[in-house]
Image: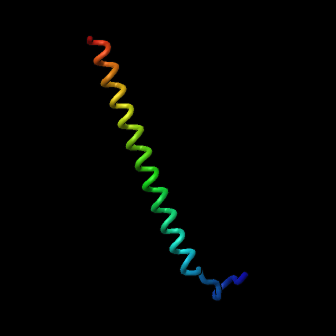
Amino acid sequence: MVTGHRAHIRWWHRVRSVALLTAFVVIGGVATATAIGITLFLSGFLVEQAIG
């Protein structure tokens, strides 16, 4: 293991990090959108049940 001025991050570490970060952001966005969609759908459904 090299430390100090000679330490360099390998190019494939950078690529892997970017890929994983992108995947986490996309998966998190999809999960958040799904949770919001389900909440809105259920709240609308419950309002319809209360009115009807």
Furthest residue to the right? Answer: 1
Q: Position of residue 39 (x, y in %)?
A: 38, 31
Picture layout, residue 1 above or below residue 29:
below
Left or right position of 16 against 35: right
The spot of residue 42 in percent (x, y) is: 36, 26
Q: Nearer the viewer, residue 37 or 6?
A: 37
Q: Position of residue 19 (x, y in %)?
A: 49, 66
Q: Residue at x 31, y 15 (%)?
A: 49
Whether 11 is drawn above or below 50: the answer is below
Residue shown at 52% from the left, 63% from the top: 20
Split into 4 quadrants, where in the image is the N terminus? Answer: bottom right
Picture quarter containing residue 26? bottom left
Location of the C terminus (image quadrant): top left
Identity of the residue drawn at 37% across and 37% down: 36
Total labels: the figure holds: 0
Residue 9 position within the rendered picture, expressed as x and y whole percent measured from the top left: 59, 80
Rendered position, 32 above or below 19? above
Q: Is 36 on the left-hand or right-hand side of 4?
A: left
At 58% from the left and 81% from the top, the residue drawn is 10
**Above or below 32: residue 40:** above
Nearest the viewer among 12 and 8 is 12
